[in-house]
Amino acid sequence: MDAGLLNKRGSSMINIQNLYKRFDKLEVLKGIDLSIEKGKTAVIIGPSGSGKTTLLRCLNLLEIPDQGTIALGKQTLKITESTKLKQAEIVAFRKQTGMVFQGYNLFPHLTALENVMEGQITVLRRSKEAAREKAMSLLEKVGLKDRAEMYPFQLSGGQQQRVGIARAMAMDPEVLLFDEPTSALDPELVGEVLKVMKDLSREGMTMVVVTHEMKFASEAADQVIFMDGGVVVEKGTPNEVINETKNPRTLQFLNKVAER
């Protein structure tokens, strides 16, 4: 291995430089450069196939980039074509992030409380008592304290997704990553999940959110990033990208979204 985890960093901001990722001959990310400040919310928008989810998955090494540098939290990872990462390096880097997926990915045989406790006990080695206390606090935070002993099948989709958010937060991540967290929900359940995310944003949690929810992007984001064809087409404040953009590709996308 000629590169891997480099210096420890004091800031939890994210810096991405010259990031590339391909699947076979398909180049999905084509030299991404991005910077996200600590305590800020970045929303990534763009059409299907633009590379949004791949970028998110590269941030926590669910996908290993082919090339580039990712500075996240306290660590910097530099990858070249010949880099061979050790599993311990991947785990150490991944521990800094919490991921909330499209599907809820809850353990069906565990209650909401047990789902939020599980990673704390098995990965962080917390005692059951400490894990339970933390889990109950987080379930209360997402408005589900009274559903703690229910199993996933007894919860609505919005409630399951809120349990997923609590589970991600239980691991004390530097950054929360959301991959279209409301796309699988009935429209009437979307609001309850977005409210939790807005609360986290206001509290200063560093978040990177892939979504088609333009209202959320306008109200909660500090930075909006529009991707297409594996590149960042435009980035700026919500007002700059959503309301005042002059970029024809961004305008085309926003018009399509507005038609839905």
Image (cartoon, rainbow, N blue to C red):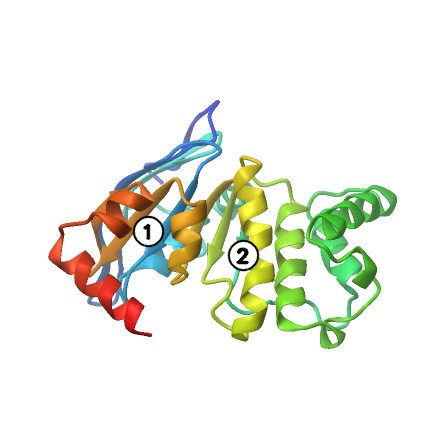
What quarter of the picture does the C terminus occupy? bottom left
Q: Is residue 242 visible?
A: yes
Question: Which residue sits at x=78%, y=67%?
Answer: 110
Residue 211 in picture, x, y percent from top left? 41, 60
Question: Which residue sits at x=70%, y=68%?
Answer: 107
Q: Secondary structure at mark 2?
A: helix
Q: Secondary structure at mark 1?
A: loop
Residue 56 in picture, x, y percent from top left? 40, 53
Q: Are marks 1 and 2 in contact (CB under 8 Å)?
A: no
Which comes before the other along the chain, label 1 or label 2? Answer: 1
User: Quarter of the image holding residue 143?
Assistant: bottom right
5 vs 210: above or below: above
58 vs 1: above or below: below
- Using the numbered discs, state the Cα–Cα distance from disc 1 to disc 2 in whole angstroms: 30 Å
Q: Nearer the viewer, residue 248 or 154?
A: 248
**Which residue in the rendered view is the most extreme toward the right?**
129
Q: Nearer the viewer, residue 53 or 244?
A: 244
The disc labelled 1 sits on which kind of residue?
Pro
Say left or right for 155 vs 20.
right
Residue 29 in picture, x, y percent from top left? 25, 55
User: Which residue bears the numbered disc 2?
Assistant: 194
Camera-near label (1 vs 2) is 2
Residue 53's mark?
none
What quarter of the picture does the N terminus occupy? top left
Say left or right for 224 vs 170.
left
Question: Which residue sits at x=41%, y=61%?
Answer: 213
**Total number of numbered discs in the rendering:** 2
Q: Is residue 20 visible?
A: no
User: Which residue bears the numbered disc 1?
Assistant: 65
Q: Nearer the viewer, residue 4 or 102?
A: 102
Q: Nearer the viewer, residue 130 or 254?
A: 254
